[in-house]
Amino acid sequence: MRKINKIILHCTATPEGRHTTVEDIRRWHKQKGFNDVGYHYIVYLDGTIHDGRNVEIVGAHTKGYNTGSIGIAYVGGINSKDFKPKDTRTEEQKKALHKFLVKLMSQYEGATLHGHNEFAAKACPSFNVKKEYNDIIKTYE
């Protein structure tokens, strides 16, 4: 089993409300030269969580931090009017993410929770992970 020390949240940088699938993301990532989808899990608009890259395989989601981390992306993250960063998570995505993060944090003891923007000059995931999930972070630190 791969040692996980970070769980890193992302957005797909797709406009608000636009349905996007794992296969869409896989295609985009392969066009960028990745050998597969870079994220381990993707949270669809309806809150369902879909497998991306096998969690036992190092991801391609946060340059310099892929070893020892799991990448999770929610579909969205961009305003559909001006294409600027925006927290576009649906209520279903918010509920699913919270529940899933609790599960992962309990499964990977000692792992820390982060937003992509903590490691790169990007808005991704378009919200403050530390503030949003402070309850989970405090429980598992």
Image: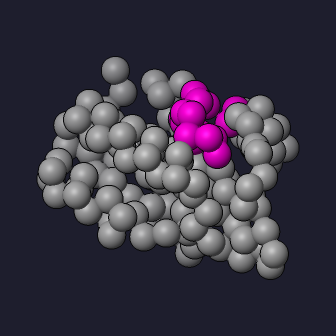
Type of secondary structure dominating the magenta stretch: loop
Question: Splitting the image into 4 quarters, where does residue 2 fall?
Answer: top left
Q: Magenta part of the protein: which range? A: 36-53
Which is nearer the eye, 86 or 115? Answer: 86
Q: Does residue 71 sit above or below 121 in this rendering? A: above
- The figure's colour scheme reads one colour
Say which quadrant the N terminus sits in. top left
Residue drawn where x is 33% and y is 69% of the image: 131
Q: Does residue 55 sit above or below 139 in this rendering? A: above
Q: Is residue 48 visible?
A: yes
Q: How many marks?
A: 0
On the image, the x and y values in percent for residue 84 come to 71, 77
Any magenta on residue 43? yes
Residue drawn where x is 32% and y is 59% of the image: 133
On the image, the x and y values in percent for residue 110 come to 19, 43
| 113 displayed left or right of 37 | left
| 77 displayed left or right of 33 | left
Residue furthest top as drawn: 1
Q: Is residue 33 visible?
A: no
Q: Does residue 120 sit above or below 54 in this rendering? A: below
| 38 displayed left or right of 137 | right
Which is nearer the eye, 73 or 6? Answer: 73
Residue drawn where x is 37% and y is 47% of the image: 98
Residue furthest front as drawn: 91
Any magenta on residue 25? no
On the image, the x and y values in percent for residue 70 come to 44, 40
